[in-house]
Image (tube, grey):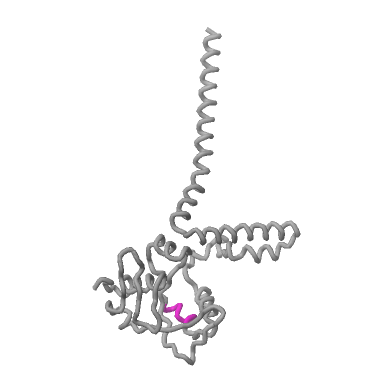
Amino acid sequence: MSSASGYEDAKEERERAAKAAADDKQAFAQEFSKPRMDATFLVNNYTAPALAAAYQDREYTLRQCAELLHEGKLDELRHVLKPYHDFSLDRSNQRQTPLHKAFTPHHLERIRKRLSRLPRQITKAYTRLLGILRCDWSNVTSITGIAVTPVVGFIGEMSDQSVVINEAEVDSLFTVPLKDLVNADLWIRRPNATPVFTGGPHVVWGLTAYLLDLCVEEVLLLDSEA
């Protein structure tokens, strides 16, 4: 009886070990399934040049960080990593990302600096900010190969005297009246293509036209097919 009992114990021990090994193997496989899913999403939604540029920037940043860490230059390392880990601590010392507070005056100030002497109304417009324009992100990224966050707000009156663009960043700047923007006759729409707006001093196409068309439909609540 004792030998039979010992055999059963050994058998149960082997079964438990086999089950534990199977669980470990399953957990190991699951752990590496997410990167493959992420890579598939990137390949399906970004252009090849955009992916190549992104990976090149990533490798350059990692190499730069490794060199700074090896040399003990922690302040410079923190400066390099800050754009990728721009978080703050609230009163409860919880880690907060920029998205926690959504779109802030800091982001508007960065836009203003990009356009050099854009009127100060753009920073004050934070109080009249409508919010982030909801859209199909896969369509947005497929148009240009980069991810953007369209934001809708009210800036106020602008004139040639109040706006001086940063020529290193922007080639030209112009405005379009809403009455022209909502005029369907000034839009060109073709199947499987982004819309084109022809009512301004320059033709608006690509991602800008796509977002303008979406703004007309989602913010002004006008049917783009009307």
Residue 33: where, in percent of width, then height? Answer: 49, 44
In this view, the residue in front, 186 or 110, is: 186
Count of numbered marks: 0
For the record, the magenta segment spans 122-128
Residue located farthest toward the top when viewing the structure as drawn: 1
Where residue 203 appears, as percent x and y from the top left, is 39, 78
Up the image or down, 191 lies above or below 41; here it is below
Q: Residue at x 51, y 48 (%)?
A: 35
Q: Is residue 19 left or right of residue 195?
A: right
Q: Residue 187 lies in magenta, yes or no?
A: no
Where is the C terminus found, in terms of image quarters? bottom left
Residue 130 seen in the figure? no
Foreground residue among 115 and 84:
115
At horizontal 33% and vertical 63% (from top left) the residue drawn is 192
**Can residue 121 be seen by looking at this rendering?**
yes
* Prevalent SS, magenta region: helix
Instruction: Farthest residue to the right: give it.
Output: 71
Question: Would you place residue 161 above or below residue 221 in this image?
Answer: below
